Amino acid sequence: MIAVLQRVTRGKVTVDGEVTGAIGHGLVIFLGVMRGDDEKDSEFLAEKIAGFRIFGDENRKMNRSLRDVGGSALVVSQFTLCGDWRKGRRPSFVKAAPPEEGRALYEDFMRRLKDKGVPVQAGEFGAMMEVSLVNDGPVTFVLDTRAVD
């Protein structure tokens, strides 16, 4: 699984003119599910993200987690994170999980994040979405469960 985290002051997802999810202070999480990912990946990411200390304390040092600051998460499925761009001029998406597997793990990840005390809003899996956000910092991290030993 690949997650791109953007610390935000606000974020919103719109599908066909309707808002499907919106948050204030927190994280917009773009989530890509790869072939071979499983519940261990979603548990690892949910645990890491809920406690990841990337929010400022009273001295503006990154010492506080999403839970510590009472922030929310807006989770957006994004299979393009799984794209292989190394050959040619058009990316290949053969490494992305099939839609039914991707949806199941996307939903599993959000459930696990909620279970860790993080309020979660969402985009719409598989839909063409408009995502707007105001990056705070800017602070952006890429977490890839396959890069973990």
Image (cartoon, rainbow, N blue to C red):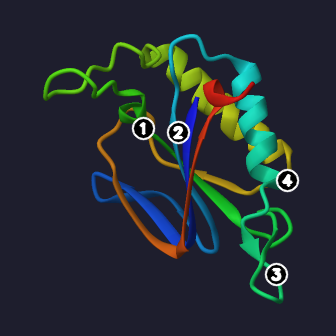
* Residue at the extreme left of the image, as rendered: 89
Which residue is pictured at 13% across the width and 29% down the height? 89
- Real-space Cα separation, disc 1 to disc 3, in angstroms: 31 Å
Q: Is residue 56 left or right of residue 124?
A: right
Q: Are marks 1 and 2 in contact (CB under 8 Å)?
A: yes
- Real-space Cα separation, disc 4 to disc 1, in angstroms: 24 Å
Q: Secondary structure at mark 4?
A: loop
Viewer-side residue, 57 vs 98: 57
Which circle, 4 or 2, is nearer the viewer? 2
Q: Is residue 59 above or below residue 108?
A: below
Find disc 2 in the rendering and name its residue.
31
Find disc 3 in the rendering and name its residue.
57
- Real-space Cα separation, disc 2 to disc 3, in angstroms: 27 Å
Q: Residue 103 location in percent, x, y?
A: 53, 25
Find disc 4 in the rendering and name its residue.
117
Q: Secondary structure at mark 1?
A: loop
Q: Is residue 52 above or below residue 11?
A: above
Q: Residue 25 location in percent, x, y?
A: 64, 74
Which residue is pictured at 81% across the width and 41% down the height? 47
Instruction: Say what amino acid the circle numbered 4 marks.
Output: Gly
Instruction: Say what amino acid the circle numbered 3 marks.
Output: Asp
Q: Are marks 4 and 2 in contact (CB under 8 Å)?
A: no
Q: Secondary structure at mark 2?
A: strand
Q: Counting residues from the N terminus, which is met first, the one under dot 4 or under dot 3? A: 3
- On residue 78, the disc is 1
Q: Counting residues from the N terminus, which is met first, the one under dot 1 or under dot 2? A: 2
Viewer-side residue, 15 vs 82: 82
Which residue is pictured at 85% across the width and 47% down the height? 116
Instruction: Say what amino acid the circle numbered 1 marks.
Output: Gln
Q: Residue 101 location in percent, x, y?
A: 53, 15
